[in-house]
Amino acid sequence: QVRARLKALDDAELARQSEAVCERLAKNPWYRESHSIGVFLSMPKGELRTEPILRHAFAEGKRVFCPRVMGDGWMEMLEVRSAEEAANLPKSKWKIPEPLPDSPQADPADLDLILVPAVALNLQGGRCGHGAGFYDRYIQRGRAGAASAGRRCRTVGLGLLEQRVDDIPEDAHDERLDGVVFPDAEFMAEEAGAPGRAGADGAGGD
């Protein structure tokens, strides 16, 4: 059971894995080429910490947008301007930091890369979320808008070792991810839409 494994993680191991995911993501070509990215802000426990990614993204001069729940099943990504701002944002009823409602809002189609949380992930781009559908709907909007503009809105799931599973059931509304990054492995789908490839130990998917 993934949730039980996550609950057993201590802070030191969570921090180690989070740093390892950040280091691997920093070498990812989609991340390196991105100018505007969507980044989730972490739950207080049992989820990869995105603070290292935020610090790296701001140091690289990227524009960073983070999720805010706007209504039932509806979220938007609003701009956060520094790691310090992110650390001091008010928390939602789920104890997750959220940008202030008057912050600049991204059109999902304009984001070069969306970093996606999950309960479980596999190395084929499959994702099991928390069940509310926030990200599936947001990704659908981003992909549709980007496609009409002749560009790509890429999505990458970030996971801890305890969140990697082999099989994830998929429903019609589930959006398969373009990539997945774990501390020790990653997956990046082929640009042409062919089946993706998995790589480990810095192989970057080759």
Image: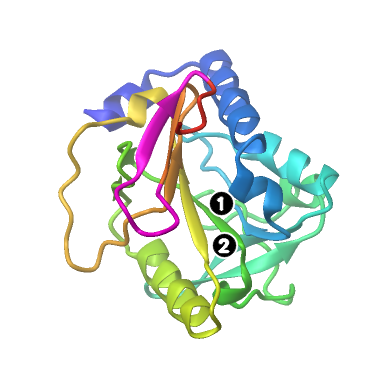
Q: Measure the C-alpha gap from mark 2 to mark 1.
A: 6 Å
Query: Residue shown at 56%/75% (left/top)?
Result: 109
Q: In the rendering, which numbered label is found on residue 30?
A: none
Nearest to the observer: residue 184 or residue 160: 184
Query: Residue shown at 28%/25% (left/top)?
Result: 4
Please determine whether, in this image, residue 73 is positioned above or below residue 165.
below
Please determine whether, in this image, residue 23 is positioned above or below residue 131.
above
Nearest to the observer: residue 139 or residue 134: 139
**Rendered location of residue 72, percent (x, y):** 38, 75
**Rendered location of residue 82, percent (x, y):** 82, 51
Indicate left or right for 66 with 171 as reference.
right
Q: Is residue 122 magenta?
A: no
**Rendered location of residue 34, percent (x, y):** 68, 56
The amino acid on which the numbered mark 2 sits, given as a three-letter code, is Pro
Pointers 2 and 1 in contact (C-beta within 8 Å): yes
- Which range of residues does the magenta coloring cover? 189-201
Query: Residue shown at 43%/79% (left/top)?
Result: 144
Residue 168 figure quarter: top left
Name the quarter where the N terminus is drawn: top left
Asked if one can make out residue 28 in the rendered structure from this viewpoint, the answer is yes
The amino acid on which the numbered mark 1 sits, given as a three-letter code, is Phe
Query: Residue shown at 44%/46% (left/top)?
Result: 179
- Residue bearing the label numbered 2: 67
Asked if one can make out residue 74 in the rendered structure from this viewpoint, the answer is no
Name the quarter where the C terminus is drawn: top left
- Residue bearing the label numbered 1: 40
